[in-house]
């Protein structure tokens, strides 16, 4: 009965949001992204927001942020870092933060993690970074591939694999997708095109024809039946780069500030070449594109 009521509340929440957004034309935030810390045990070359100490929140601040977001109407939650599974505040751990979010009434909770810690929280979605084949992943993220797969196998919740696409792993993406799919422990595969300061993207990222070619390859893999989270609408929007952003329905808290959409909202050079496929997916669902709405409902 409790599970049935929870499912009913989720769909009532979706209906209420759809009515407010599409009928009343409101732009209230629905997805809340909480940067709970920036402590991380890895040293990936494309990450510049780790181990600075700027974003480490205490449990009281976490509760306050979650309560405020829920009060503003947010019902979906993503917790990220840093590495959020490392978050601690005295005797409190990430499990306590998730439990509080559930008590508040967040319908959909995801946790973005590097997967090197036990995935021992139930009734959420883990988004775990797998940056390519074992060889490529370990070159980018240390010798962590086998440990991640062991944790995925024992996970208490569904797991989605996430790949950050760059020059380093571009040549082997088909092999990586086949490898991830063959493992059988992942509910889906999502991806981002490396999104960073222009100088970093120029050195490591995919721009122009390389970007277009990569998107075509990801779409081809999707068409072949691999479980890539990418609608036709989002694929076209990413390729033409004409999707509307920032997205008012996404609120992100990092430190003492609430950002609209993401932390790079104030940097047009980064925003202009955004490669976050999930943001493009959300933008196309909000634009009432049927394929994006279907993909979003299928994913959540």
Image (cartoon, rainbow, N blue to C red):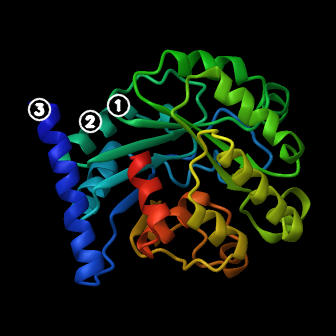
User: Which comes sooner in the sequence, label 2 or label 3?
Assistant: 3
Q: Residue furthest left?
A: 1
Name the residue located 33 percent from the left edge and 46 percent from the top edge.
108
The single residue placed furthest to the bottom in the displayed view is: 25
Tag shown at residue 173: none
The residue singled out by tag 3 in the image is 2
Q: Relative to residue 103, is residue 248 drawn left or right?
A: right
User: SS at mark 2?
Assistant: helix
First in sequence: mark 3 or mark 1?
3
Residue bearing mark 2: 99
Using the numbered discs, state the Cα–Cα distance from disc 2 to disc 3 in whole angstroms: 16 Å
Residue 96 position, x and y percent, is 30, 33
Tell which of 216 and 19 is nearer to you: 216
At horizontal 35% and vertical 31% (from top left) the residue drawn is 95
Q: Are marks 2 and 1 in contact (CB under 8 Å)?
A: yes
Label 3: how many Cα within 10 Å (few below 14, some 14–19, many 20+)? few
Picture coordinates of residue 33, whole percent (x, y): 43, 56
Looking at the rendered structure, the secondary structure element under dot 3 is helix
Whether tag 3 and tag 1 are in contact, CB under 8 A, the answer is: no
Q: Which of the 4 image quadrants contains residue 91?
A: top left
Rendered location of residue 242, percent (x, y): 64, 80
Of labels 2 and 3, the one closer to you: 3
Q: Nearer the viewer, residue 196 or 157?
A: 157
Q: CA distance from mark 3 to mark 1?
A: 20 Å
Q: Does residue 93 appear to the left or right of 231 in the view shown?
A: left
Does residue 169 lie above or below 280 as drawn? above
Query: For mark 1, what is the residue?
Result: 95
Asked if residue 47 shows in the view, the reply is no
Q: In whole angstroms, how far apart are the C-alphas of marks 2 and 1? A: 6 Å
The residue at the point 22 percent across, 50 percent down is: 10
Q: Could you say whether the residue bearing mark 1 is in a helix, strand or loop?
A: helix
């Amino acid at each position: 009965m409790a599970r049935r009521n929870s499912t009913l509340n989720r769909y009532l929440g979706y209906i209420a949001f759809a009515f407010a957004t599409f009928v009343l034309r409101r732009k209230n935030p629905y997805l809340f992204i909480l940067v709970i810390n920036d402590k991380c045990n890895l040293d990936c070359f494309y990450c510049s927001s780790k181990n600075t100490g700027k974003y480490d929140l205490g449990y009281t601040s976490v509760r306050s942020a979650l309560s405020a977001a829920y009060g503003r109407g947010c019902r979906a939650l993503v917790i990220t870092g840093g590495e959020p599974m490392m978050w601690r505040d005295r005797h409190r751990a990430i499990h306590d933060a998730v439990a509080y979010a559930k008590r508040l009434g967040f319908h959909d909770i995801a946790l973005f993690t590097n997967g090197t810690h036990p995935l021992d929280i139930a009734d959420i979605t883990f988004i775990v970074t797998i940056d390519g084949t074992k060889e490529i992943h370990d070159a980018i993220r240390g010798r962590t591939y086998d440990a991640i797969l062991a944790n995925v196998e024992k996970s208490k919740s569904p797991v989605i694999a996430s790949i950050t696409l760059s020059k380093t792993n571009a040549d082997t993406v088909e092999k990586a997708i086949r490898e991830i799919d063959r493992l059988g422990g992942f509910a889906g595969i999502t991806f981002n095109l490396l999104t960073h300061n222009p100088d970093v993207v120029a050195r490591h990222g995919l721009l122009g024809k390389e970007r277009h070619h990569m998107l075509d390859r990801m779409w081809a893999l999707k068409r072949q039946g691999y479980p890539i989270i990418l609608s036709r609408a989002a694929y076209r929007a990413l390729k033409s780069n004409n999707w509307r952003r920032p997205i008012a329905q996404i609120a992100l808290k990092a430190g003492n500030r609430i950002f609209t959409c993401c932390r790079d909202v104030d940097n047009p050079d980064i925003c202009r070449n955004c490669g976050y496929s999930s943001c493009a997916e959300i933008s196309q669902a909000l634009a009432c594109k049927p394929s994006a709405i279907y993909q979003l409902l299928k994913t959540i």
